[in-house]
Image (tube, rainbow, N blue to C red):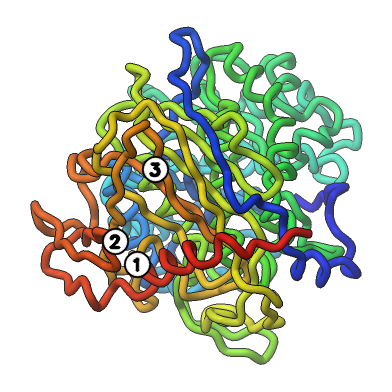
Amino acid sequence: MRISPPWQLPASLLLLSLSAVSAVPPTVNIEIPVPAKDAHLRSLDRNLVSWSIQNRDLPIFARSKLLENLFKALSTNVALGQSVRLGGGESDKTTYGADITITAEKYRSGYYGAQAQGNVTLGPNYFASFKEKYAPDTRYIWCLNLINTTNNFEAAISTAAGVLEYLGDELDLFEIGNEADFYGSKGFRDPDWDTSMMLPEWNYIADEVEKLAPNKTIKFMAGGFANPAYIVTKDFDIPGVIAAGYQSSRIPWYSMHLYPQSGCSGAVTIAPLLEHNTLSDILSHYIPQVAAAESVGAQFAIGETNTVSCVGRPGISDTFAAALWLVDYALFGATIGIRRVYFHATTTGSYSPVIPINYSIDSGNYSAGVLPLSYGAYFVSEILSFNDTLLVTQIEDGNDTDYSSYSIWDETNHLRKIVFINLQVYNSSEGATNPAMPDTEIYSSDHARPSTRVTVATPWEPGQELSLIRLQGPGSNSKSMVNVSDFTLSEKDGSVTSDLVDTIITVQENGDVVFDLLASEAVLIQHYSNVLANKHPTKSGSKAANSTVDGVIMRTRGADMSVASGLTLNNGVMVSAVLLSAILLFV
């Protein structure tokens, strides 16, 4: 998607936006009342953060353990396999041949990389190149070729046959066509192309695919349009396709795509990633899309998205700001009924969670590694970790341009978790580079890192023991040194290299929960008993290791870890939060 939104900042304002200090108050006081019994809280899908990957790229991701181990960490937390949409621009260039003998190793070598502008022909060994190389229970959505009409859509139907044979029960859904709202303008169909013209083609393919497996219930995700909800062309949105006739029990999901900034042309900036009001304004346009899907008993997803289109932009997509943005994006979307958000990834794109291979581009050599977006996804998996259904809502008076907050409840109206995100800009020269990405300008804020004291009035009983964990990094613009309360992944293979450390706090006598939060940081607070009740990829023992640092209890998940060696950043964050809360600067 290549639409440039009206709020995109011109290049001349970039440095100003990066150096400004946002006006987050030095103290924030909010109250969380128990919701009324008839309050309409939205449930959280365990696959709220999901993934979109080009069909030809998954074998290349399978060359390393990076994505597999990230998936394992996420799936262990949410007790469900990851959802992966295999789709994108190349879906409409793909066909399948049962007699294609290219080896699995050849697919993993990036064999089709040079053919990205042409047709991509897959064979049986394509599926062998990645199958069983990811975390258990990974589920797939496959996007079929709608552009190629040759021999009554043979490309789509033959590919579906291969997918059904080799993915089997791992397949959740088919999509038909990628960003079909662009077909008319790009010359793939008549300029007057609309959803009513697409319907007979879509239905023909769907009918033929169902005939391939008469004993299997095959489901579809309809939509997949490029233009965002605020710039719909013709009737290419969810109300439009439903009105045209795309509604039946075989369509349980509808989707649209969204890239808040266009990296295909024009200037892009880091600033919109750190503005909650900008994000909420964008996503609020999708409320009618959600309503349309729900009106026919279906669910709505953002089927392809990320920070900046056209594989992202170094210095924006590969920063800690993108990780904070992902958390706010997923949670705010959930509050308005967006069930899943599929973050698009390519093997070398700066908006990817991991880079699976060493590569060269523009005379530079780069290595495989982990990007900050992974830690945003992991933080969300901690939010989703619970034994029963969780419901989410924004905290009233806990949201502004530079911060946002959410309360998480169970179905019996018990408060289970609190999330607070400080989106205030703070830039640092620490962690300014990442060997997986090209270097970009290094800059630092010219002031001390501000801190905010947050007091939350809760219905929790005084004295209860709470876990507090932080999504943290040196600065908004940092590309490395990002972690979730010391939880980190190996740059080599994505395995866990450092266990998560919970800060233990207690509910005060009046029910208040008090914590300090640095600029560009997020916290998750929940009962520590809930942490112990859930599986965790780094919890190797039945008891956690305890340590007291400056009077604060720190509890490491994984009893064999040396606590003292892993607390430097967390302790520093705590101390800094206290010392800096009085010196907040205002714009």
State the separation of the CA atoms marked 1 and 2: 5 Å
For label 2, count other residues whose C-alpha is less than 10 Å away and answer few (under 14), some (14-19) or many (20+).
Answer: many
Foreground pick, 223 / 274: 274
For label 1, count other residues whose C-alpha is less than 10 Å away and answer few (under 14), some (14-19) or many (20+).
Answer: many
Foreground pick, 35 / 178: 35
State the separation of the CA atoms marked 1 and 3: 16 Å
Q: Position of residue 493 (x, y in %)?
A: 33, 73
User: Residue at 32% across / 57% down in the picture?
Assistant: 134
Asked if labels 2 and 1 touch by Cβ distance under 8 angstroms, the answer is yes
Q: Is residue 305 left or right of residue 164?
A: right
The answer to whether residue 585 is above or below residue 513 is below
Mark found first going from the N terminus, 1 or 2? 1
Per the image, label 1 sits on a secondary structure element best described as loop
User: Residue at 10% across / 57% down in the picture?
Assistant: 541
Q: Position of residue 576 (x, y in %)?
A: 48, 68
Q: Which mark is residue 486?
A: 1
Mark found first going from the N terminus, 1 or 3? 3
Q: Position of residue 291 (x, y in %)?
A: 64, 18
